Amino acid sequence: MVLIIDSHPYRYEAEALCRMFLRGRELKIFEGEDIPAEDFIYTGVFGDKISVRIKMDGKDLSAKAETSEGKAAKMEYLLYEILSEITGLKPKWGTLTGIRPVKLALQMMDKGISADEVRRKFKEERLVSDEKLDLLLSTAEHEQTIRALSKPESVSMYISIPFCPSRCSYCSFTSHAIEKAAKLIPQYVDLLCEELRDTAVLMEELGLHLETVYMGGGTPTVLTPEQMDRVLSTARSSFDFGGVRELTVEAGRPDTITPEKLEVMKKNGVDRISINPQTMDDGVLELIGRKHTARDVVDAFYMARSFGFDNINMDLISGLPGDDFDKFRKTIDSVLELEPENITLHTLTVKRSANLAGDAQKMLSRSVDEMNEHAFRCFDEAGYYPYYLYRQKGTVEALENTGFCKPGKEGIYNVFIMDETHSILATGAGGVTKLKDPHGPKIERIFNFKFPYEYIDRFDLMNERKEQVKDFYERYPL
Ligand code: SF4
């Protein structure tokens, strides 16, 4: 399929919208007025006039509109209507293709627009379904309470441990299977500790206050107990932890969790951990390359409880290859039986870098939306509510990832990062520091080197980039 962009700058919007309907079909983009293929999606904007024509699957439909503002949104609307008629699909998020729909709603509410008016606008102008509007507005309500905790001087910190015991087939993160990368870890930990100390000095100089800390990856619990202790105790002794509201470690894979590591986390004040089954079906676990069983998840969970962890998140994924509605239903039942404080339901995202993007994609279940609806119902009945959500490119059926929690157990870091409430200072390979103007919407990013070997080899150069943090806060003072 060919997408033609004629005389307008809305290529990104047009492409994102079309991909929701094309579901894996190849899409080539051409700029200009020529129509180089038999089947095509044409988009043109001339002054206030917007024109869309789609020739596809034996149908040839077109639509026109005229508007002086919101041209991209209007073009998306026309594309959605025609693509929906041709394909029979009705993506439930309507024409919203961005990562942060809740942020969009909250920005409107910040301008004094009521929740009812946001609902009306999203429904009529962006074609969002009632079901997603309920989810969106309920999440927005809970996010509002959390983001109100942030002050101009607030920042959060991300500590990256980009290593895993093995690589999951659906993974699109920069994470390195431990067998190959093990020899890098000691030096990585040394430098990470140095970066943490430097970051603490910088924060103190700038008068910044640490709100939440998230140690993620990868799988941080691939480190030995001693290595974990070094990273966590360096963080604790370098920063002022007096006002820190949450210290999360993404334990992730249950096969990496041991009593020694739980003890180290407890000793260092970790008060929230993630134990991520993704699915509780052993066959599916094997198929996606996880080297643990559902029983391991249950054992790790109770082990963590026995060490006093009373705030545990569990990540699940809907749409995994080999999964079906029945297995998914059992996964939900098994996880609810454990009564974790948080459950995060991801919808599978198929990116080019993941091994899944090839043949395995054909094995994906077709009823992902049905699975999510079922999960949402069960979570609601069990007393959980949604407190943050985000969308990703390439998610199966253009669905979303949602964090649910028991009352008062929101993962605070998750809200801050998704809402872009305040700056996130990232440490470690692959970390992206995101600087946010304390009094406005301006955001700037500083990228750490992506791979551990680059992080190690070019550490000094990378650390110099942190000078940009000072520069930012000089331009956007507290
Ligand atoms: S545990 Fe997470 S980061 Fe590691 S390979 Fe699996 S999906 Fe990727």
Image (cartoon, grey):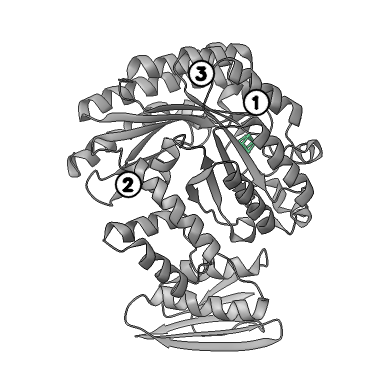
* Residue 187 circle label: 3
The residue indicated by pointer 2 is: 444
Image coords of residue 386 (percent x, y): 50, 47
Q: Is residue 82 left or right of residue 191?
A: right
Contact flag, marks 2 and 3 (Cβ < 8 Å): no
Q: Is residue 42 left or right of residue 46?
A: right
Q: How many marks?
A: 3
Q: Quadrant of the C terminus?
A: top left
Image coords of residue 428 (percent x, y): 46, 29
Report whether residue 136 is seen.
yes
Q: Residues within 10 Å of mark 1 (few under 14, many from 20)?
A: some
Q: Is mark 1 within 8 Å of ligand 1?
A: no
Q: Is residue 124 left or right of residue 435?
A: right
Asked which secondary structure carries label 2, the reply is strand
Identity of the residue furthest to the right in this view: 283
Q: CA distance from mark 1 to mark 3?
A: 14 Å
Contact flag, marks 1 and 3 (Cβ < 8 Å): no
Which residue appears at 44% of the width and 56% of the height? Answer: 137
Q: Quadrant of the N terminus?
A: bottom right
Q: Is mark 3 within 8 Å of ligand 1?
A: no
Image coords of residue 282 (percent x, y): 79, 35
Q: Amino acid at mark 3?
A: Gln
Q: Is residue 229 placed above or below 337 in the rendered structure? A: above
Asked which secondary structure carries label 1, the reply is helix
Report whether residue 173 is seen.
no
Asked which secondary structure carries label 3, the reply is helix
Which of the 4 image quarters holds residue 57?
bottom right
* Residue 178 circle label: 1
Q: CA distance from mark 1 to mark 2?
A: 32 Å
